[in-house]
Amino acid sequence: MTMIDKALGPAALPAILAATTLSGTLVLSCMMPFAAIAALCALAQPPRRALVSIAGCWLGNQVLGFGLMGYPWDGPTLAAGFSLLGASLVAHAAARAVAGRSANPLSAFLAAFAAYEGVLFAYALGFGDPALFAPGIVALVGLNEALWFAGLWLGWQVLSAPCVPGLAAPGRMSARPRIVSLLPSATEIAVALGLGDCLVGRSHECDFPPEVSALPVCTATKLEQGLGSRAIEERVKAIVEKGLSVYDVDAALLKALQAPT
C-alpha cells in the first residue's frame, strides 16, 4: 500500500482522475493530459492499480468523445484512440522506471511526456500527420501537460495535508497549508474538498466558484486582449520559440503569500 492509499483511502485518487477525465475531455478534447495522468499514477499507485486507473481514464475519454462530442465512428479515429492508450501505458512505464531511481516528480513527468510524445510521433509517421509534432505545437502540448500535472500533484498534496478533516496523524498538530492555485481545475478541486479557506492566491483564469474571485491574482497572460485566433496562434508560437512562458507570474506576490500577514 502506498503512502497516498494510507492517507487518503482507495477512492480519493480515482475521484481526482475521474474529475480530470471529465473536465479534460469536455474542455480540451484533443489535448487530454494523458502523460500527466500516467506520471501521477506511476508516482501514487502500485503498478496494477495504476494501469487500471490509466485505462479507466482513457475509456472515459473515449466514451465521452464518441458518445457526447460526436467523434466519427471510423477506422482512423478508433485507431488514433488506441494509440493514445498505448502511448499512455508506455508513458506510465517510463515514469515508473524514473520514479524507481529518483523521488523527483518532475523527472517522472518529463520521462512520461517524452515517452508519450515519442509513441504518438511513431504512430503519426505511419498513420497520421507528423506535422502535428512541430516544435511549437509540442511545446504547447507540453505546457498543457505540465499545468495539468501541477494541478494533479497539488490535488494529491492537498488531500494528504493534515488540514483535511480526519487525515491528521494522531497526536500531530494540524497546520493549514497556504495554497496558491494556478490551474482552474485545481482551484475547483480544492474548494470541492472543503479547502477553500486554504486558498490564498489564484491565477487570472481561476474564476469558479465565484468566491475565489476575491483572492489575489498571481498570474497574467502575455497575450493582448481582442486578438483573433490566428493572431493568438502566431503570438503564442513566437513566445514559445523564445523558450518563454505565455504567462507572467508575480514572484513578489507569491513570496508575500508564503506566510500569514
Image (cartoon, grey):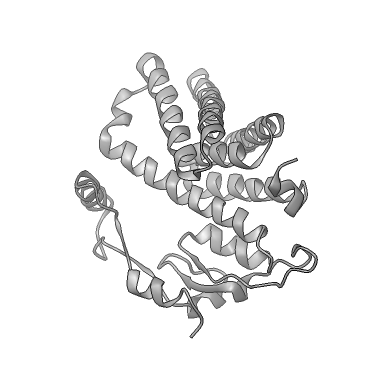
Residue 31 x/y as whole percent: 45, 41
State the residue in front, 217 or 40. Answer: 40
As drawn, the residue found furthest toward the top would be: 126
Q: Is residue 98 left or right of residue 235?
A: right
Please report the residue visible at 25 percent of the width from the left and 47 percent of the height from the top.
240
Place residue 2 in its image quadrant.
Answer: top right
Question: Does residue 30 appear in the picture of this structure?
Answer: no
Q: Is residue 186 left or right of residue 4?
A: left
Q: Count of labels shown?
A: 0
State the residue in front, 74 or 122. Answer: 122
Q: Is residue 225 left or right of residue 90?
A: left
Rendered position, 258 above or below 114: below
Q: Quadrant of the N terminus?
A: top right
Residue 103 x/y as whole percent: 53, 42
Residue 178 x/y as whole percent: 54, 71
Residue 207 x/y as whole percent: 49, 69
As drawn, the residue found furthest toward the front would be: 171
Please report the residue visible at 61 percent of the width from the left and 76 percent of the height from the top.
197
Question: Does residue 32 appear in the picture of this structure?
Answer: yes
Rendered position, 232 above or below 260: above
Q: Is residue 61 left or right of residue 220?
A: right
State the residue in front, 127 or 242. Answer: 242
Place residue 45 in its image quadrant.
Answer: top right
Please report the residue visible at 50 percent of the width from the left and 44 percent of the height from the top.
105
Please report the residue visible at 76 percent of the width from the left and 49 percent of the height from the top.
6
State the residue in front, 59 or 194. Answer: 194
